[in-house]
Image (cartoon, rainbow, N blue to C red):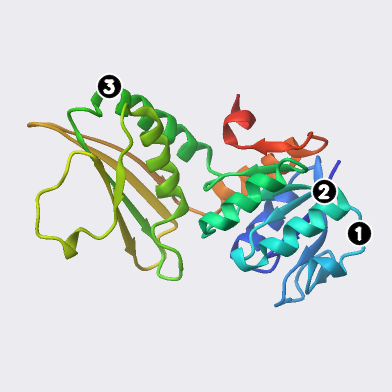
């Protein structure tokens, strides 16, 4: 039985994760952390990780990038593995996560969906075949409450494509400010925000007289919650290191 601490327990993702865990027998949430406790959880909810008294094996984090330092500190002190589902980290914070993985088992991915990670693998294969002759554009769409842009998933897809190409590509986010032709060494990344869109990601390979589009559509947050819970069970008892969906689905 994997014992879980859930940070961001009373947020939208936190509530979905609670529902997913309630239907499983291989894990349980022993405590939650959320500054805004709605009183609906079946487990104790604390305002800060430092207040948690329950013992756990894994922390699932869907909170806020600003809480990363306290999250890493608590995990080091308690010996808990980490499943990080929060997005919007800056480069310094990403380095902090990488450094912490030398001491802790950390599962870190920009998207917990199995389908998105398959899309990334397909995009890498397409880039290897088409990359030199096709322009590459990534379009991501999310709900109007999402703060960060572009999405972490869009950047994950861009990184996957970049790794598959012979020469490094630059990311172009703001083409409207330029009056010049598109260069060959760029990946365009475009963000759309509106309504209640859960998550839509498309990769366009535009060539001479033909276009190829790879896409993924998330219809509910449950796909991310299921992935996060699967990751938590997978991480129970793992040694220090950085883990991602590639190991989980291998």
User: Which is more foreground, mark 1 or mark 3?
Assistant: 3
Q: Is mark 3 on a helix, strand or loop?
A: helix
User: Which picture quadrant has residue 133?
Assistant: top left
Disc 3 packing (10 Å; few <14; some 14–19; many ≥20): few
Residue at which label 3 appears: 129
Seen in the image, is 96 located left or right of residue 150?
Answer: right
Residue at which label 1 appears: 54
First-in-chain label (3 vs 2): 2
Quadrant (top left/top right/bottom left/bottom right) for the C terminus: top right
Q: Residue at x 74, y 64 (%)?
A: 70
Q: Give the percent coordinates (x, y) of residue 212.
A: 22, 33
Quadrant (top left/top right/bottom left/bottom right) for the N terminus: top right
Q: In this view, does 236 lie above or below 83?
A: above
Q: Give the percent coordinates (x, y) of residue 115.
A: 47, 37
First-in-chain label (2 vs 1): 1
Q: Residue 80 carries which label?
A: 2
Seen in the image, is 237 located left or right of residue 164?
Answer: right
């Amino acid at each position: 039985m994997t014992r879980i601490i859930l940070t961001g327990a009373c947020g939208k993702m936190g509530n979905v994760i609670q529902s997913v865990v309630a239907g499983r027998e291989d894990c349980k949430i022993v405590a939650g952390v959320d500054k805004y406790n709605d009183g609906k959880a079946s487990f104790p909810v604390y305002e800060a990780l430092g207040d948690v008294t329950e013992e756990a094996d894994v922390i699932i984090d869907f909170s806020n990038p600003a809480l990363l330092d306290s999250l890493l500190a608590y995990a080091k002190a308690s010996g808990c593995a980490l499943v990080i589902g929060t997005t919007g980290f800056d480069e310094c914070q990403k380095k902090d996560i990488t450094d912490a993985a030398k001491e802790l088992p950390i599962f870190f991915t920009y998207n917990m969906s199995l389908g998105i990670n398959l899309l990334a693998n397909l995009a890498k294969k397409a880039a290897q075949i088409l990359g030199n002759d096709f322009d590459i554009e990534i379009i991501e769409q999310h709900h109007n409450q999402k703060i960060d842009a572009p999405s972490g998933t869009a950047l994950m897809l861009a990184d996957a494509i970049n790794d598959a190409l012979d020469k490094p590509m630059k990311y172009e986010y703001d083409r409207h400010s330029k009056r010049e032709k598109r260069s060959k060494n760029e990946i365009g990344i475009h963000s759309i925000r509106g309504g209640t869109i859960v998550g839509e990601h498309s990769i366009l390979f535009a060539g001479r007289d033909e276009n190829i589009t790879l896409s993924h559509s998330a219809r509910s947050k449950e796909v991310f919650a299921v992935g996060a819970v699967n990751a938590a069970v997978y991480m129970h008892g793992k040694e220090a290191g950085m883990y991602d969906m590639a190991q989980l689905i291998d």
